[in-house]
Amino acid sequence: MSYTTIRQPEGMVYSYDNLLRQAMIAELVAINDYSDILAYSDIKGLNNILEHILEEEKEHYGKLLNLLRKVDEEQYYMYRRVLNENESKYLEPLRIDYGMEKKDRRFILDKLREEIKGELEAIVLYEDQLRKIPDPEGRTIMYEIIMDEKEHVEELTQALLKLDKHKYGPISRC
């Protein structure tokens, strides 16, 4: 598995632990994308939706890493080792002020469409992965994440329909 093209995995995943890692990479891309659009948006209602989705994407990452630690003994060992040795325990949470660099509204609409595309790509990836997951806990977690991603598509689409003056066929409101 390589990531030589921007944000796109290449190759096939042959192990359950790497399937989880691939999903974690997708979640990190989503986290960065939502953080990016929040930095440029000054639309309060939209920011509330984006922050809600960002929180869920972070939760997905945490669920997947927790599951990975259960199936990969080496990953769990490193987790325990880092807890005991790592200097990161001295770090303080960063205060991030989303919205310092505002962009024009067209940029916001473009980013919204990119976010919807990303959610759809995640659904395609995760539904394919769901069939390959050997244990019930992993399947349950992946299914819950898929349902969240589908909710995100609908939340983002509703925001797009409200903010874009153009129509999107039968889903547009009068």
Image (cartoon, rainbow, N blue to C red):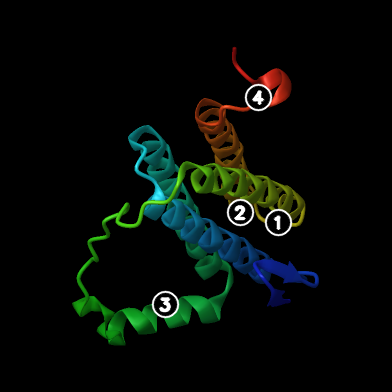
Do residues under tags 3 and 2 come within 8 Å of each other at their CB atoms? no
Camera-nearest label, 3 or 4: 4
How far apart are the two marked residues, 4 and 2, measured between alpha carbons? 40 Å
Q: Which mark is residue 167?
A: 4
Alpha carbon distance from label 3 to label 1: 23 Å
Is label 3 in contact with label 4 (beta carbons under 8 Å)?
no
Query: Which amino acid type corresponds to the residue marked 1 in the rendered image?
Result: Ile
SS of the residue at dot 4?
A: loop
First of labels 4, 1 by sequence position: 1
- The residue identified by callout 1 is 133
Residue name at image x 57 percent, y 74 percent: 72
Q: What residue is rendered at 72% in x and 69% in y?
A: 9
Q: Which residue has dot 3 on it?
A: 79
Q: Regarding mark 3 in the picture, which secondary structure is present there?
A: helix
Q: What's under tag 2, amino acid-wise?
A: Gly
Q: Earlier in the sequence, mark 3 or mark 1?
A: 3
Residue type at tag 3: Tyr
